[in-house]
Structure formats: structure tokens, C-alpha cells
Amino acid sequence: MSFSIGIGPNIRKSAYFDATVRDGVQAFSVYNHMYIPAHFGDPQAEYDRLLTDVAMWDVAAQRQVQLDGPDAGRLAQYLTPRNLAGTRAGQGRYVPLCDHDGWLINDPVLLKFDDTRYWLSVADSDIHLWAAAIAREKGWDVRISEPDVSPLAIQGPLAMDVAEALFGDMVRDLRPFAFVETALDGIPLVLARSGWSKQGGVELYLKDATCGTALWDKVRQAGAPFGIGPGAPNDSERLESGLISYGADMRWQDHRATPFEMDFGPLVDLESDIDFVGRAALLRLAASPPARRRIGLVLDDTPPLPGHPVPLMHNGAQVGIVSELALSPRLGKTIALGLIRADLAQAGQACDLQIAGDLWRARVHDIPFIT
């Protein structure tokens, strides 16, 4: 069964949309109200390229929320339970965001340009509205906006070789999550050592959408000797690596999670006197071990992939939720990520996934599946 997605004005096109269509994109998804490529016709080849060579991805749907003004740092700290006191200009931080009840509502990368300007590179939710409402309620002197920024990712074992061909050997000095403002043949961008995979690489935060096709083509040309090709963030590689996806693993309202359930405990500072949204709730939650734990699962068989969360069962009762399943090419099995009742979280524990009324046997597995 195949479907198509309608292209209309209610969903925004990325700066690289025309280039991806020209280069053979076969399916789109929607992320942050934008089209994002899902695959270019051969997902297995795209997976192989990511694992052995280098891939380029249109991830412009990874939108930026800019905090700009004298109170930008104050707002940035209030939005996250992670202590930002030691964050330097040019440094990124992975920061959980919680609501007032302690539920996770996003897990962006924060980029600090200086004390008065920050970006939140957000997952799939309207955090600009949240940030703007909090800033206004607090009466702080900070402007919330969405800058003209469109990330393009270069990922894979040869990604740094491609980045070096584009920007010179300075890319080798970038530490993970560090970034610099630069330009490529006059195209303004931010170069960051980050990405949507565990294979390593960089993201080019294009700062002029009119240059989208030009930047795409420069990356494609520089990457040609290394076997670069277009693709998209890969579900199989994400699950194998145990990477967290806000939109899949902790979606707002459909199923929620706390930072402690998602193993973000080390990023929650309850010892210092910093104030942040949800502090009182997180103090209460931290007083007891989490009722659920994040786990991996290996299935005995190969069920249909439902494309949505499914119940996790044990002895006829629901004991958790499975957020996503995918076939692991490296393991040769269907694997999954989810949350399970803490007393059942030990490796080897048998349980069942309920998919369309059928039960599929699985066993708990430590994550990541592959290091």
C-alpha cells in the first residue's frame, strides 16, 4: 500500500526543497510544520551510506527559536533544568525542557552566541510560543523570534572529510556541540559539530534561505569523492544507537515522560539555587525512583511496523509503551524502544507488544543495542 502527501501552503517548504526534489526524494514527512525528506527511494542504501560513507540530509525543519536581548540568558536558564552557568560563547548544550508538572516538552540543543543571544534548535513542537509566553509573563527584556536559519546535516564516518574539503582543517578542532559563525563562498552559516545520528558529523545552519540550492550543491560536489548521497535521519540507526527522539519517544499528550524516566537525571540540577520551569515538580519526582524505565526490546518475529506507539503487555496487563519499532540491519532482528514498569526493566525480561490486536513476544535489551 502506498500513499502520497499533498504539497500545499499550510506546510512550509525548506530552503533545500527544490534541490531534494531534483535529486529524487520519494517521500516526505512533516516536522515543525515543514516538509522533511523521509527517503530517496532506497532506504537500505541510505542506511549503508550513513554507516560506511557519508550522507547529506535536509533537516531544515529543525527550527531555531532565537532569544535576543539583555534577559536572553535569564530566559534560557529558566526554560531548562540544566545548569547553564558554565556555558561559553560558541558552545552548544543538550537541554531538556519541562512543563510545570515536570513532563518533558522538548529536548533541543541550545547554542550560545553571547550573553544576549541564544538559539534553541528544537524538536517537533511549538517551543517559540512557550518561550514567548513565559518571557512576557515574567516581564523580561528579551525578544523571541524564528531567524532565517535552515540546517543541513553531513553525517557518517567520512563526514569530517567532506567538512574539511569545504571549510579547511579548522573543522577538526571543533569539539562535539561546538560551533562557529562562518561563510562558504559568501553563503553565511553556522558550522556546528552535531547531528541527528551517532555516526558523527556536522550541521550547516544556513542563514539565508535563498542560498539553499547553492549550499546543497556545494556540499554534494565536495562530497562526491567520498560517495556522498542524499538521505534522511534513519530510524533503524537511531534505534540501534539508542538515540532519543522527542517526537517519537515522548510526544506531548499522546504519551509523556519525565527527565528521570528518559535518563536525563544528570542534566537536572536540583542542588544549586537556579530557578526553572518545573523545579518544584522535579524535586518531588526526584525524591523517589522513577516508576518507569527506558528500555530496548528485541522481538522474536517480524511484526508489521505500526508507525505509532503501541502497548507493552505482561501477563495480560499493560506495563509500558513502545514508542517505535524498526528492523535492525546489523542485528537482523526487529528492535524497539519504549518505557516499561521499573520492576520489569531487567535485560531478558519477556513481554509482549500489542499491535492491531495481536501479541508479539519480545525481550528487554540494554541500550544502546550497538555501541
Image (tube, rainbow, N blue to C red):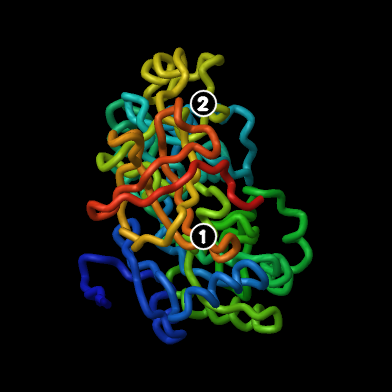
Task: Nearest to the eye among marks 1 and 2: give it.
Answer: 1
Q: Is residue 280 left or right of residue 368?
A: left
Q: Identify the residue shown where x is 27% and y is 53%.
A: 358
Outermost residue to the front: 315
Can residue 215 be seen by looking at this rendering? no
Q: Identify the residue shown where x is 47% and y is 62%.
A: 327
Please tell me which residue lies in front, 255 or 14: 255
Answer with the quarter of the image where residue 170 lies.
Answer: bottom right
The CA distance from mark 1 to mark 2 is 35 Å
Please tell me which residue lies in front, 248 or 85: 248
Please tell me which residue lies in front, 119 or 93: 93
Q: Identify the residue shown where x is 34% and y is 41%.
A: 312
**Percent position of residue 357, x then y:** 23, 52
**Percent position of residue 207, x then y:** 49, 63
**Percent position of residue 97, x then y:** 42, 35
**Percent position of residue 369, x then y:** 59, 50
Label 1: few (<14), some (14–19) or many (≥20) C-alpha neighbours in 10 Å: some
Q: Is residue 198 left or right of residue 340?
A: right
Q: Which mark is residue 17?
A: none
Label 2: few (<14), some (14–19) or many (≥20) C-alpha neighbours in 10 Å: some
Residue that mark 2 sits on: 268
Residue that mark 1 sits on: 333
Please tell me which residue lies in front, 343 or 238: 343
What amino acid is at disc 2?
Val
